[in-house]
Amino acid sequence: MMSSADAPPCDALARRPPVTVESFAMTGWHGSVAACFNPFLHLPCLIPLYSTMPHQITLHHLDLSRSDRIFWTLEELNLPYDVRVHFRLPTRSAPPSLHKVSPLGRAPALILDDKLLTESAYIIHTLLSLPEVQQAAQKGEIDVQVENTNDDVFWSHFAEASMMNLLQGMATVGATSQGWLSGKVPGLPEMSEDEKKGIQKYSSWLQDGYFRPNIQSTIDFAENFLAKQDAPFFSGTSKPGEGDFMMFFAINSFLGGSRADMGFKVGPNLKKWYDTVLSRPAGKKALKRLKQEEESAKAKI
């Protein structure tokens, strides 16, 4: 029978610094250590199992949605992820498959280790706050502004509250008025020519008299901010941050997406910002991955 004197030494205790309450709180059972019990020492011996537990990330993407922000963010952070593509119905609304994932049926939606995250800004903020992302930034392994600057916070809010609020309104008015005029809205009674003219007149005023000039003002505001900055990004630094990720959807739609032919004037500084984003390896990979995922999903329909 082996005595305590014959027991093999606990290498973990010999080689690792003492485990304190603070260090254990930083790692926890899921992070980097697991307990083994040495019967001869009568105390727990902590041995390293792995440095980090990889996250299981699934991005639920709806075509023509704000999901491109999340593709770019994930690529910049070097986080592996799966994608599930959902296609809009002929009415442009979300399909039942997305409603099964997100209660409101909106995209992007992201599953992070079985936890549902919705709202672009919250998703991005959560990803930037992951401990391994923070550590990677500190080590220079990723070129991202993970600590929010004041500019980051402002542009993150501006992207939705000022810019997308108007863009969404304009898109909704345009789509619904065309649906009414074409008779494709279910349940509507047949309209007279005078009623159709009234809808067309009101829709045109809203789009050209209200939405368009106000949207142009938000574009000009963003252009002026970049023009006054020495730094190239909305984060106010040399690295893209939360504000940049949030602004990407709108600027991408003006310069390379669904709004490219709508006549909005985008200045040279915004164009330079956009070119800078697309010249980054992560920017290229993000749009390529988005396109590939949509094409692959369509081929299976």
Image (cartoon, rainbow, N blue to C red):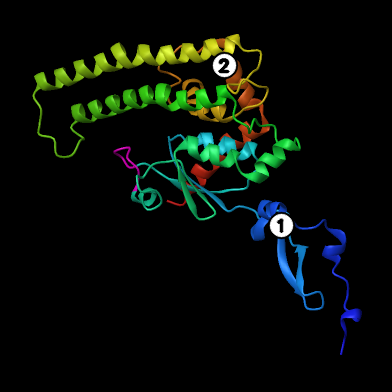
- Residue type at mark 2: give it: Lys
Position above or below: 28 against 192: below
Position above or below: 86 against 143: below
**Where are the magenta residues, as a range?**
89-95
> How far across and how far down the image is residue 210, in percent?
30, 14
Q: According to the image, label 1 marks what residue?
A: 32
> How far across and how far down the image is residue 171, in percent?
33, 26
From this viewpoint, is residue 165 visible? yes
In the structure shown, which secondary structural element does the residue marked by tag 1 occupy? loop
Sequence-wise, which precedes: disc 1 or disc 2? 1
Closest to the observer: 283 or 91? 283
At 14% from the left and 22% from the top, the residue drawn is 196
From this viewpoint, is residue 263 visible? no
Mark number displayed over residue 271: 2
Q: Main secondary structure of the magenta part?
A: loop
Closest to the observer: 6 or 115? 6
Query: Would you say residue 53 sits in the magenta stretch?
Result: no
- Residue type at mark 1: give it: Ser
Closest to the observer: 34 or 21? 21
Which corner quadrant of the image does residue 16 belong to?
bottom right
Which corner quadrant of the image does residue 28 belong to?
bottom right
